[in-house]
Amino acid sequence: MAATGANTPRERYRTQVRAEITERAWEQIATAGASALSLNAIAKQMGMSGPALYRYFASRDELITELVREAYRSLSETLRTASASGADLGGLGHALRGWALADPQRYFLVYGTPIPGYHAPEDTTAISSEIMTTLLEACTALAPDGAATPLGAYLEDHRDWAAGHPAPPEVLHRFLTFWTRLHGVLSLELAGHFAGMDLDPALLFAAELDSVLAPRT
Amino acid sequence: MAATGANTPRERYRTQVRAEITERAWEQIATAGASALSLNAIAKQMGMSGPALYRYFASRDELITELVREAYRSLSETLRTASASGADLGGLGHALRGWALADPQRYFLVYGTPIPGYHAPEDTTAISSEIMTTLLEACTALAPDGAATPLGAYLEDHRDWAAGHPAPPEVLHRFLTFWTRLHGVLSLELAGHFAGMDLDPALLFAAELDSVLAPRT
DNA sequence: TGTACATCAGTGAACGCGCGTTCACTGATGTAC
DNA sequence: TGTACATCAGTGAACGCGCGTTCACTGATGTAC
């Protein structure tokens, strides 16, 4: 047997406990934010002593790193699933919003105020370019935008970030617009900046999404 | 004499020390973020003992509240000054970016990930509607957008947040677009999400700003 | 199947730290007569 | 101008807390012969 790397009972137990740790960590983050994440509190909640967690994560920073990785993976998977179900760029936009609303602090962990001393792990760039690829494909599949934008010329020369995707500059521009505009509405909504304004954030989001899908209709 | 409320030497000293406290607080926030703000550390940096600060702020939360107020006031003043110098909406956009870049953590204190247990003070709404007024006036002064948007009809019925400003729905829509789009690019830039992409954030910002100023050119 | 050994999850005590906050106090500054 | 009193900024000790992390250890689980 020995199918995937590790399958002994001990190793299965290990990954199971690791999973429970990150699960509790997410609960804690959802409640009090990432800066309040505490190894001791997680251990207590699991009925273990604090030092026990050091069998599974070498430090608090390493746990956060794992959470960041999980968040990226989760978003990537959400988008890929939606895409596989036939969602176009508009569908991916709504999938993104759903993912963000499901756990605002998870969204902020990735796209929010950077944690002071913390530096994201290297390997997230791999998953992040997976996300980009899914979105770039959806951007490409849309009816072409036609007119070349001033930024388009610039993007022709600065396309290295596109993970080798052979998209024309208008598509790259559309991707960037998709990203920044949706992040704009979404992060303000999640931070509660529309509260008390009696505005439905869903409508604002939809309007911005439309502006990306059909810029000049 | 006794011009403005308080002018005795003691009171002048008080406001001076208060000012130095918030100044040090800003330095600390700029370095390590808002969640790392520590009264004791500020006191030490000022050559005072920790408890001394309690003569000036009743608690850590009250200090943060004052910082939030200062941030709002500072942004409001920046925009008003620009506006008074003849800046149009485009000019205000660049003023906003300049203000944000001058101290990213200050920007995040107001528009970033909300601090877990903390609730913003009531009186910021006053300053925040001052900001809104400045922007709404600049939006109104622009060449009219003409076409009524779908969201416009909705905004006609939900305009209470506009601080009594008699702007037509297209102008309200333009204001919202200004706010959310610029926040989108800006917050991603400040959080370092364009780093490593070899993109000039200034160009992305300018492109988004253009999209607000001349939506269908 | 049974014994000897290695692996490793988890414990409890401890270290050192910095935090916010309280309290009783000293000493300087301002006020009233 | 001088004295008596009130105000108030700042100190130092202390409280209680929770944090991340280390260390020597027990005891259960797995491995080799």
Image: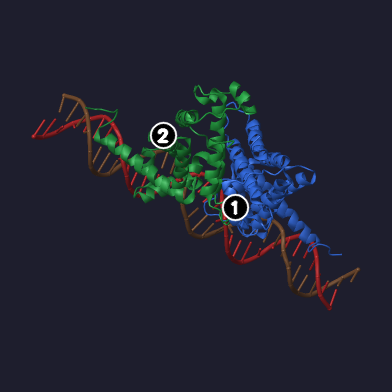
Chain colours: A blue, B green, C brown, D red
The residue beneath circle 1 is A155
Which quarter of the picture shows residue B151?
top right
Judge whether A85 appears above or below D21 on screen. above
- Whole-number angstrom distance, CA of label 1 to CA of label 2: 32 Å
Residue B23: x and y in percent read 38, 44
The residue beneath circle 2 is B83
Q: Which chain is home to disc 1?
A: A
Image quarter in which the C terminus of chain A is found: top right
Which residue is at a point 45% across and 49% down the rendered structure image? B30
User: Do pointers 1 and 2 mark residues of a single chain?
Assistant: no
| Amino acid tagged 2 | Ser
Which quarter of the picture shows residue D26?
bottom right
Q: Which chain is home to disc 2?
A: B
| Amino acid tagged 1 | Leu
Q: Is residue A94 left or right of residue B82?
A: right
Q: Answer whether residue B172 is visible to the viewer in this image.
A: yes
Q: Answer whether residue A44 is visible to the viewer in this image.
A: no
Q: Secondary structure at mark 2?
A: helix
How many numbered marks appear?
2
For mark 1, does the 10 Å Cα neighbourhood hold few (<14), some (14 to 19), or many (20 or more) residues? some
Q: Secondary structure at mark 1?
A: helix
* Front one among A76 and B94: B94
Which residue is at a point 28% across and 36% down the rendered structure image? B12
* Front one among B53 and B20: B20
* Front one among B191 and B109: B191
Residue D11: x and y in percent read 33, 47
Residue A207: x and y in percent read 64, 33
Residue B130: x and y in percent read 45, 29
